[in-house]
Image: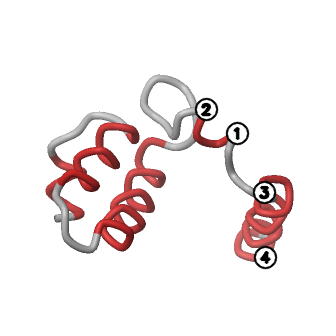
């Protein structure tokens, strides 16, 4: 289902909405599909994670700091 959603969409938003509308274990399906779509489409722009979705993330600054620290530890 995750790869199906990814292969039948052209951007992050559509991938997540397709995954959610498949039903079943939607939280897991969307989490995996979203992770894959995030790798492919990135953040913002026409295809990436929508800015309005990013702005709603709880503790966004803390999450971004964790990501930056992970990135530094992996690629330093």
Say whether marks 1 and 2 touch (CB < 8 Å): yes
Q: SS at mark 1? A: loop
Q: Mark 2 or mark 4: which comes first in sequence?
A: 2
Assign the C terminus to one quadrant of the image.
bottom right
The residue labelled by disc 3 is 64
For disc 1, the neighbor class at 10 Å (few under 14, some 14 to 19, many from 20) is few
State the residue at coordinates (41%, 57%).
34
Q: CA distance from mark 3 to mark 2?
A: 16 Å
State the residue at coordinates (79%, 76%).
73
Task: Give the number of the mark in front: 4 or 3.
Answer: 3
The residue labelled by disc 4 is 73
Q: Mark 4 or mark 3: which comes first in sequence?
A: 3
Q: CA distance from mark 4 to mark 1?
A: 26 Å
Residue 68 % position (x, y) = 79, 61
State the residue at coordinates (19%, 62%).
23
State the residue at coordinates (36%, 73%).
28
For disc 3, the neighbor class at 10 Å (few under 14, some 14 to 19, many from 20) is few
For disc 4, the neighbor class at 10 Å (few under 14, some 14 to 19, many from 20) is few
Task: Give the number of the mark in front: 3 or 2.
Answer: 2
Task: Give the number of the mark in front: 4 or 1.
Answer: 1
Judge left or right: residue 3 versus residue 76.
left
Q: Mark 3 or mark 2: which comes first in sequence?
A: 2
The residue labelled by disc 1 is 55
The residue labelled by disc 2 is 52
Q: SS at mark 2? A: helix
Picture disc at residue 16: none
Q: Mark 4 or mark 1: which comes first in sequence?
A: 1
For disc 2, the neighbor class at 10 Å (few under 14, some 14 to 19, many from 20) is few
């Amino acid at each position: 289902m995750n790869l199906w959603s990814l292969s039948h969409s052209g951007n992050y938003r559509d991938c997540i909405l397709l995954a959610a509308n498949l039903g079943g274990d939607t939280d897991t399906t969307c989490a995996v599909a979203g992770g894959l779509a995030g790798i492919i489409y990135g953040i913002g722009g026409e295809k990436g994670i929508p800015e309005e979705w990013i702005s709603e993330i709880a503790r966004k600054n803390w999450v971004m700091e964790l990501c930056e620290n992970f990135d530094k530890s992996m690629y330093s």
